[in-house]
Image (tube, grey):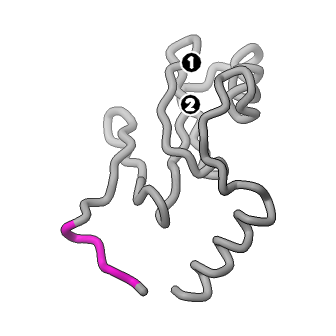
Amino acid sequence: MKIALYLSQKNKMISGEEDKAFLGEDKEFLIIYSKEKLKTEKIDYFIYGHRHLPMVLDLEQNAKYINLGDWISYFTYGVFQEDFELKTFEEKTKKNYP
């Protein structure tokens, strides 16, 4: 776990992902990509994890853009039953790792 945390933080510093602010729909490359794909295909869900910013956004044609966030900072994960839900792991059950 310590090695994973170290490498994750080092990678974020190198790639500039320390800044997790939402840039706006017109500047977020995954949202732009999703909207472009909707022009040629019917897709219900675009589910990503790369951006590390938890978010569910309604797109055109009843499609949803979903970014799962991350497990280290937000403790978010997705659940799909009849619809998709973005959830946060409960603090009281979360283990405290050094």
The image shows residue 34 at horizontal and vertical percentages of: 69, 27
Q: Total number of numbered labels?
A: 2
Taking the spot 72% from the left edge, 20% from the top edge, the residue there is 26
* Residue 72: image tag: none
The image shows residue 58 at horizontal and vertical percentages of: 50, 20
Taking the spot 51% from the left edge, 26% from the top edge, the residue there is 57
Q: Which residue is mark 1?
A: 59
Query: Is 94 on the left or on the right of 57, as rendered?
Result: left
Residue 35 occupies which quadrant of the picture?
top right
In the rendered image, which quarter contains the C terminus? bottom left
Instruction: Identify which amino acid the numbered label 1 is placed on.
Output: Leu
Taking the spot 76% from the left edge, 55% from the top edge, the residue there is 16
Query: Is 94 on the left or on the right of 59, as rendered?
Result: left
Q: Is residue 3 above or below residue 76?
A: below
Observer-nearest of 22 and 89: 22
* Residue 65: image tag: 2
**Is label 1 in a helix, a strand or a loop?**
loop
Magenta residues, start to end:
92-97
Residue 11 occupies which quadrant of the picture?
bottom right
Taking the spot 39% from the left edge, 83% from the top edge, the residue there is 97
Query: Is 97 on the left or on the right of 10, as rendered?
Result: left
**Is label 2 in a helix, a strand or a loop?**
strand
The image shows residue 15 at horizontal and vertical percentages of: 79, 59
Q: Is residue 45 above or below residue 61?
A: below
Q: Is residue 3 above or below residue 22?
A: below
**Alpha-carbon distance for marks 2 and 1?**
7 Å
Task: Mark 2 and mark 1 in contact? Answer it, CB < 8 Å.
Answer: yes
- Asked whether residue 94 is drawn in magenta, I would say yes
- Asked whether residue 45 is drawn in magenta, I would say no
